[in-house]
Image (cartoon, rainbow, N blue to C red):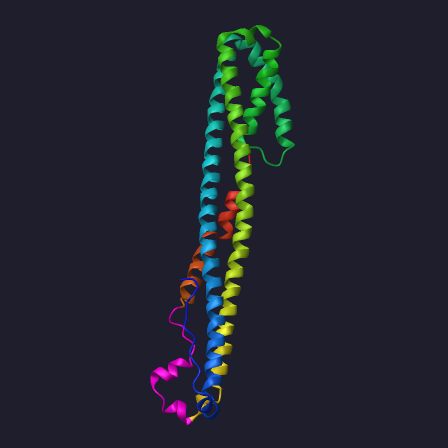
Amino acid sequence: MGHLERTKVKEKNVVRGLLTGINDAIYLKNKYQNELDRAWKSIVDMVHFIEDKNKELKINANRGKSLKEDISAYYEKRGGLFESLNNLLNKESSHEFKMWQETQKHSKVNSIKSKQKFKDTDIDEINYNSMMQYIKQYPEYQTKSSYKRIFEDIENVQEGIRQKKKEYHKIIGIYNAQYSNLLKDIQKAKDKIIAFNKIYDEGTDKLNNCRYRKSLDYKISSEKTKEAVKLDTLSYRVEQFQNTLDIIQKEHAKNQVKELTEMEY
């Protein structure tokens, strides 16, 4: 529910208002009720805005995970192509290529030791570079259709990896910005709820302590008259909106955003 269209409680005649203080009570009631309505509208608008942004965040989170899976699939396909190239070289130049591989082992081991983390994809790259160094010594391999086909497939896969990585890092940047803004917006919404409650507490306190509420006229008045000088809270669903904010916040716990941002290649 957004903005509430309320009819102000009308003040009583001047004489009765002066004698009982009821007009002062009505003034306070109208003043704080209007403030509550404005504060409530602000809460509703903010929470609906957050719900929309939360949907966008989920879409981008899923997109990031999907891209990660695509990149992994490309790496797997590339690994198969590297293996096919390796098998072809072993088949056509078994002795010379195996000797080359032995020569390259030491440099690969040293390279591996120089890094703190070494992934399977790094090993694949090293093996591929080693094979390409060997092939450069024998240009005739590069013209054979069997090799050309593998080279083309590898280049296509490499391009796919580059494009998916580019998309992935772009979506991660968007996701991180959205996540940071979402946390800020949730805090703003919670601050609005705090402000709403303060208005209610202040208004209730002033109404409870006004002269009319302590008068005999108030004590013997009808329930309708008594309600006219109380703040109406039936239209507000503050707890419901607080729960919505809590649920959204829990959906994006720190471990979830960390999991997404650490998908590096």
Viewed as shown, does residue 1 lie left or right of 126?
Answer: left
Q: Please say if 165 is above or below 177.
A: above
Q: Is residue 235 left or right of residue 46?
A: left
- The answer to whether residue 145 is above or below residue 176 is above
Quadrant of the snapshot with the C terminus? top right
The mark total stands at 0
Residue 71 seen from this side: yes
The answer to which quarter of the image holds residue 6 is bottom left
| Residue 221, placed above or below residue 160 | below
For this rendering, which residue is in front, 216 or 179?
A: 216
In the image, what residue occupies the spot 56% across and 20% down?
Answer: 128
Q: Residue at x 56, y 14 (%)?
A: 98
Give the farthest residue toward the top.
140
Quarter of the image where one finds residue 62: top left
Q: Nearer the viewer, residue 201 or 228?
A: 228
Whether 12 is among the magenta residues is no
Residue at the spot 47% in from the left edge and 72% down from the top edge: 34
Q: Residue 264: percent from the left, percent from the top?
A: 55, 37
Q: Position of residue 230 (x, y in %)?
A: 42, 80
Range of magenta residues: 216-235
Name the residue: 50% across, 61% down: 189
Q: Can you give x and y, in whole percent of width and height, for residue 244 in the image?
A: 42, 59
Can see residue 86?
A: no
Quarter containing the N terminus: bottom left
Q: Position of residue 103 (x, y in %)?
A: 62, 17
